[in-house]
Amino acid sequence: MLLFAHMGIALGAGILLDKSLTGSHPFSTKSKFQLSSPSLRARAPSQSFEHSEEAANRQRSNLSDNPATSLASPKKHLDYRFLLIGSLLPDLIDKPIGDVFFYQTFQNGQIFAHTLCFTIFLALLGAYVYRGWKKSWCLMLSFGCAIHLILDGMWLAPRTLLWPIYGWSFPKLDPVNFFVWLPGMFHILVTMPIVYISELIGLAILAWAAVRLIQMGKVHAFITNGLVE
């Protein structure tokens, strides 16, 4: 499990998604209404407060009616806590099952949650939850899982990715002794640092996001509701 790569790159992808939906990124200090309304930015200072307020209300109404920007409202925001959880969810599910509790059965840490079927199920469930209750948490889980599968290169394991098309069983991997595996990981880190470039990128994104949250005074808001506005 490349912890920082999965979390950091998923977070970066989520920021790009939010930017594409709303026209601004979630760590901006400016309001999305300000950024997405050229007419409000160009309005002369001499105009009355009432007219500006009326225009702002119209802008908010237009944004709430637009499906592409509805996630920008406070009650429909993209919850980045679930995005981060989703980026690790396949490993959190599969590794205890396949590598620990049912090792003799599976002997593989990439099973059910590393399948495309699992991610699609989360996406469909997320669409249902969002349509019925306007909550985006399950959609964010599915998005995080999709990024995880990409970073794991699951297309190289089609029997797992496309399960159960190739059958109901998963391929079994050669047993690896932990005390052999751990020194091997350090050897790769020293001799082939390029393998960990995604880990460094993810760590840099997480560090940048943490600094921005601290600067904006939004650490508590992020912890309690996943909001970074």
Image (cartoon, grey):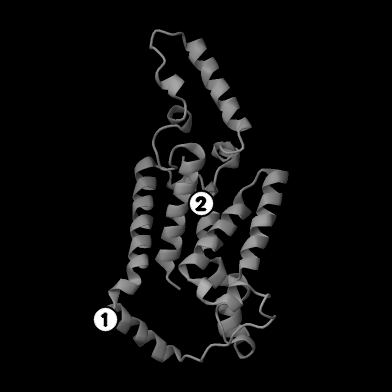
Which amino acid, mark 2? Tyr
Q: Secondary structure at mark 1?
A: helix
Q: Answer whether residue 29 is visible to the viewer in this image.
A: yes
- x and y percentages locating residue 155 in the rendered image: 52, 71
Point out residue 153 in the picture as x, y percentages from the top left corner. 48, 71
Instruction: Name the mark on residue 211.
Output: none
Secondary structure under the numbered disc 2 in the rendered image? helix
Q: Is residue 228 visible?
A: no
At label 1, which amino acid type do we have? Answer: Thr
Nearer to us of marks 2 and 1 is 1
Q: Residue at x 64, y 61 (%)?
A: 120
Q: Look at mark 1 in the image and give the residue it sits on.
A: 191
User: With respect to residue 102, does 85 lie above or below?
Assistant: above
Q: Quadrant of the N terminus?
A: bottom left
For disc 2, the neighbor class at 10 Å (few under 14, some 14 to 19, many from 20) is many
Q: Residue at x 59, y 37 (%)?
A: 70
Question: In the visual, does 18 lie left or right of 120?
Answer: left
Query: Which residue is located at x 34 percent, y 52 percent?
Result: 208
Q: Which residue is mark 2?
A: 80
